[in-house]
């Protein structure tokens, strides 16, 4: 399984949804609060060229938003 | 498997309907793209929901969500793409799966109203946002504009003030529509916020990210350098995928019987902000969710 990182802010419905989704599917991930980790915030914006959350980094591939279908595909798991 | 009921929507109406359905022992599935709806985007506390003198939308939603989960209701957080009536059943298509049920409660609430100016779609996520609580913290020490001088616009501006160096509120009318108390709070406690009236938005421009907005004020065309644009001009009913399945009002709200929450289509009920009920409040959405679930129970027993 590639390294998975979740970039989020504290009050964000889709961040919460994505966090629950990863937990339900038993995916190990690093949760990063980009309001606290400004370096990670800069990295997220630099990689995605976007200023929105959530962002999921799956082994270096960045996905913006909760795109369930795409995330399932990239993680190679069953829904 | 055919469910007794599929509830579409994970806001207050859908959650309450799920709790009631479970208590009536209905085989029920609750689906929606994400928990919370508008409540999660509220940037100031809720002070009119009984049982809590003051609570954030986030915390109230978490409490509602936990209650639904504790009841053992099946929940899927995924977008509903289509609902079709097939003989006496309904087919609900999500982004990754299909489900069938004998009845439906639509509780999809409202979606953000778009501004409809050049650059809005192009810069969505690249400086343009509808979710202040989600994306606002990413604008630390930046200059942002809130479009809309209503209650939501003022609340968003107050939230953004914790992060941004400067917050403009741009209102198209000759006066703002936010409550007097909200206006007083902003003028006395939020020096970073500046209100500009009679703004006719023209476009949002930038390079990779938003750099400026262009608007007309009287005869003048004004270019305002900003890093972020938060659009807060109200909501529209999230009913587009149900057009043709149930009757809608001229405001695209789902027409319901106010006693039973029945729609024009047998077996489909609607509750909360997506319905044509006049009062759009969390507590009313909960009430309608309860009514709809009890009506479904009666409907299924009669069948």
Image (spheres, rainbow, N blue to C red):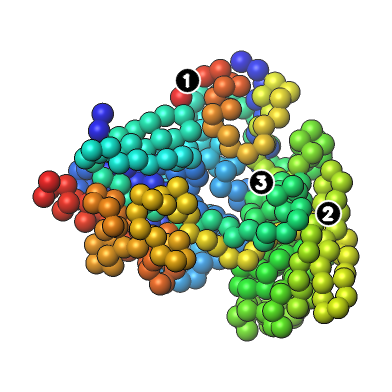
Whether residue B246 sits left or right of residue A58 in the image: it is left
Name the residue nearer the viewer: B206 or B17.
B206
Mark closest to the chain's N terminus, 1 or 3: 3
Q: Which residue is mark 1?
A: A78
Relative height, residue B79 to residue B260 (above, below) = above
Q: Which residue is mark 3?
A: A9
Which residue appears at 24% of the width and 62% of the height? B260
The x, y position of residue B13, in whole percent, is 38, 56
The chain holding disc 3 is A
Whether residue B215 is visible, yes or no, is yes
Q: Residue A45, located in which quarter of the rendered image?
A: top right
Name the residue nearer the viewer: B10 or B190.
B10
Whether residue B32 sits left or right of residue B263 in the image: it is right
Name the residue nearer the viewer: B208 or B135.
B208
Relative height, residue B111 to residue B82 (above, below) = below
Whether residue B14 is visible, yes or no, is no
The x, y position of residue B161, in whole percent, is 75, 64
Q: Residues within 10 Å of mark 1 (few under 14, many from 20)?
A: few
């Amino acid at each position: 399984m590639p390294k998975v990182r979740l970039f989020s802010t504290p009050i964000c419905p889709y961040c919460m949804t994505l966090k629950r989704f990863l937990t339900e599917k038993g995916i190990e991930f690093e949760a990063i609060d980009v309001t606290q980790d400004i370096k990670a915030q800069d990295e997220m914006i630099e990689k995605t060229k976007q200023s929105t959350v959530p962002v999921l980094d799956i082994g270096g591939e960045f996905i913006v938003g909760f795109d369930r279908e795409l995330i399932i595909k990239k993680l190679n798991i069953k829904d | 498997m055919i469910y007794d009921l599929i509830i579409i929507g994970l806001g207050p109406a859908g959650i309450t309907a799920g709790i009631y359905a479970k208590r009536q022992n209905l085989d029920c599935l609750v689906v929606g793209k994400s928990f919370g709806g508008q409540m999660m985007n509220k940037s100031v506390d809720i002070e009119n929901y009984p049982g809590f003198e003051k609570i954030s939308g986030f915390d109230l939603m978490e409490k509602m969500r936990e209650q639904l989960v504790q009841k053992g209701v099946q929940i899927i957080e995924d977008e509903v793409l289509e609902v079709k009536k097939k003989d006496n059943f309904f087919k609900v298509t999500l982004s990754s799966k299909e489900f069938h049920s004998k009845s439906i409660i639509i509780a999809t609430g409202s979606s953000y109203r778009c501004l409809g100016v050049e650059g809005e779609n192009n810069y969505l996520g690249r400086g343009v946002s509808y979710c202040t609580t989600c994306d606002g913290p990413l604008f630390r020490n930046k200059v942002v504009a809130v479009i809309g001088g209503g209650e939501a616009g003022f609340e968003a501006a107050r939230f953004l003030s914790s992060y941004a160096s400067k917050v403009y509120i741009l209102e198209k009318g000759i006066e703002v529509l936010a409550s007097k108390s909200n206006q007083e709070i902003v003028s006395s406690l939020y020096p970073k916020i500046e209100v500009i009236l009679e703004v006719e938005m023209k476009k949002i421009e930038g390079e990779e990210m938003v750099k400026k907005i262009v608007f007309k004020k009287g005869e003048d065309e004004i270019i305002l350098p900003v890093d972020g644009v938060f659009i807060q001009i109200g909501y529209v009913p999230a009913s587009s995928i149900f057009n043709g399945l149930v009757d809608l009002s001229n405001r695209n709200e789902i027409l319901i019987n106010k006693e039973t929450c029945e729609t024009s289509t047998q077996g489909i009920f609607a509750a909360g902000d997506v319905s044509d009920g006049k009062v759009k409040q969390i507590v009313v959405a909960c009430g309608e969710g309860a009514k709809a679930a009890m009506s479904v129970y009666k409907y299924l027993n009669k069948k």
